[in-house]
Amino acid sequence: MIRYPEHPVEAVVQTDALQGALNTDKATARSPLSGAAAQGAGETPRSRVLIAMQYNCPQQALDEHNSLSSFRAKNKPHNAAQRRTLLAAVARLENERVDELTVLGTRYRVVRGEEYTGLGRDGIEQPRPTRARARRPQLEP
C-alpha cells in the first residue's frame, strides 16, 4: 500500500529510506524472526511491539505471549471479571493455534519480520540519521 506522508518528518524518513535502498547493490537475508504486537482499542492503526522480534519460530513468540498473559492475569487484573477473561485467553493460547487474539479490548498478533543487510559500493549500509531508535517492549498497564 502506498500512501502520501502526512507530516514533513515522515516524508524525510521515507526519502532517506529510499535513498538507502537505491544505494544498495546487494542484500543478504536471514530467516524471518517472530515476535508479538499489541493494538489497543482507540489507538492509531499502528501496533506497538509487545514481544521483541527475536524468535526463529512463531511458536516461541506465542509461548512468550502466553507467559506474559499468565503473569498479567496473576498480577494486574482490576477485578474478578478481568482475571477470568485473561485466564480464558491463557487457556486458549495453551490449547489452540492462535495467530491473533483480542483480550479486554486489545488486539494481540504474532508478527514476522525479515532481517536483511544492504551492501553497497562502500560496504554494509550504515545506520541512517532518520532511523527510529528501537524501543524496549513494555507490558500493558
Image: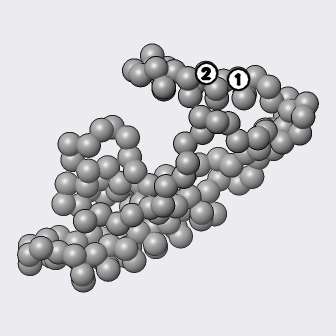
**Residue 71 sits above or below residue 29 on the image:** below
**Residue at the spot 24% in from the left edge and 81% down from the top edge:** 75
Left or right of residue 111, residue 32 in this image:
right
**Residue 45 sits above or below residue 37 on the image:** above
Relative to the observer, which residue lies in front, 66 or 46? Answer: 46
Q: Position of residue 50 (x, y in %)?
A: 42, 60
Relative to the observer, which residue lies in front, 37 or 93? Answer: 37
- Read off the residue under disc 2: 15
Disc 1 marks which amino acid? Gln
Q: Please report contact status of discs 2 and 1: CB closer than 8 Å, yes or no.
A: yes
**Residue 7 sits above or below residue 138 on the image:** above
Relative to the observer, which residue lies in front, 100 or 21? Answer: 21
Q: How many labels, in total? A: 2
Q: Position of residue 57 (x, y in %)?
A: 59, 64
State the SS at label 1.
helix
**Residue at the spot 70% in from the left edge and 41% down from the top edge:** 127
- Read off the residue under disc 1: 19
Callout 1: few (<14), some (14-19), or many (20+) C-alpha neighbours within 10 Å?
few
Q: CA distance from mark 2 to mark 1?
A: 6 Å
The quarter of the picture where residue 74 lies is: bottom left
